[in-house]
Image (cartoon, helix red, strand yellow):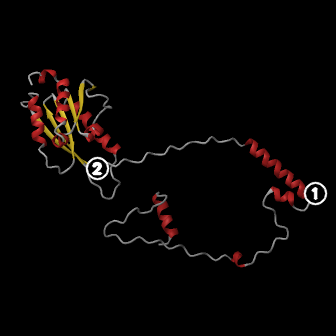
């Protein structure tokens, strides 16, 4: 198949142009299609006669040519037409084409989600494979608030949701759309009173609105940004900061402590 036949096939299929972006496994190496054979042209075999009086390339050259009455008239007409065309042609405004912002790649992470009845939805972010007692620490925090007897459900979410070696890497906007939609749908189906967003990824990708303070309100739900459980284990001094936030948000539950 030569290049002309390939273009005709693509035209029949409704494809303007096709170029493979990568080679599939076990596929043969791509090769350039052969160009169609050149058709002989009898007219090209004969030498072209030399022009006895070649035309100049611009109006300026016409004016500079040997002065004759006919050439002066032609040059004047060309200059008049050029000036009139330039005067009538509308000036098109320069449109600034917005440049898309570069995509921000996101490292893989895991979200541990706990739901305590209709009271709390906690979302904690950490790196995959981190061998830390996250479940035990979360249980201690819940026990300090006297919520340990509430029915508990746990869910784990991974990012990226599915690994695609041949496609582009998922960026921050995709992660934000995915997890913010998940949180809104989860709270719509199972309403809660509070949401804890623990860690950078949880606060950046799961929040339904900007977090402007330590206690935020969204549709009657309190949203509290907190350090992740991994950060609390690696930096124990931040537990005091967390306890002060809990006392501010839940004075009745922490009064006896």
The vertical placement of 235 against 108, above or below, is above
* Secondary element type, mark 2: loop
* Residue 201 spot, x, y in % from top left: 27, 41
* Secondary element type, mark 1: helix
- Residue at the (86%, 55%) spot, across then down: 74
How many numbered discs?
2
How much space separates mark 1 and mark 2, taking CA atoms? Answer: 79 Å
Q: Which mark is residue 210?
A: none
Q: Which residue is mark 2?
A: 107
Residue density around tag 2, few if under 14, some if 14–19, many if 20 or more, within 10 Å: few
Q: Residue furthest right?
A: 69
Q: Give whichever of 129, 175 is nearer the camera.
A: 129
Verify CB contact (< 8 Å) between mark 1 and mark 2: no
Q: Which mark is residue 69?
A: 1
Please give left or right for residue 173 compared with residue 155 in the image.
right
* Residue 63 spot, x, y in % from top left: 86, 57
Nearest to N terminus: mark 1 or mark 2: 1
- Residue at the (68%, 41%) spot, across then down: 91
Quarter location, residue 229: top left
* Residue 120 spot, x, y in % from top left: 17, 30
């Amino acid at each position: 198949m030569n290049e002309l036949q390939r273009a005709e096939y693509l035209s029949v299929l409704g494809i303007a142009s096709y170029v493979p972006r990568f080679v599939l496994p076990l596929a043969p190496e791509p090769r350039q299609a052969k160009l169609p054979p050149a058709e002989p042209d009898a007219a090209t075999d004969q030498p072209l006669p030399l022009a006895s009086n070649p035309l100049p390339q611009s109006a300026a050259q016409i004016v500079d040519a040997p002065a004759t009455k006919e050439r002066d008239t032609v040059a004047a007409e060309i200059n008049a037409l050029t000036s009139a065309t330039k005067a009538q042609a509308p000036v098109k405004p320069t449109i600034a084409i917005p440049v898309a912002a570069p995509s921000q790649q996101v490292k893989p992470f895991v979200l541990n989600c706990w739901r305590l009845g209709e009271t709390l939805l906690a979302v904690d972010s950490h790196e995959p494979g981190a061998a830390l007692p996250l479940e035990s620490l979360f249980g201690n925090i819940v026990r300090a608030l006297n919520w340990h007897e509430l029915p508990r459900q746990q869910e784990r979410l991974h990012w990226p949701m599915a690994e695609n070696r041949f496609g582009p890497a998922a960026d921050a906007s995709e992660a934000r759309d995915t997890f913010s939609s998940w949180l809104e749908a989860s709270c719509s189906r199972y309403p809660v009173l509070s949401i804890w967003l623990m860690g950078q990824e949880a606060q950046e990708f799961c929040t339904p609105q900007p977090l402007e303070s330590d206690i935020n309100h969204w549709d009657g739900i309190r949203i509290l940004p907190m350090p992740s459980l991994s950060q609390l284990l690696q930096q124990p001094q931040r537990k005091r900061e967390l306890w002060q936030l809990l006392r501010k948000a839940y004075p009745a539950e922490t009064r006896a402590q």
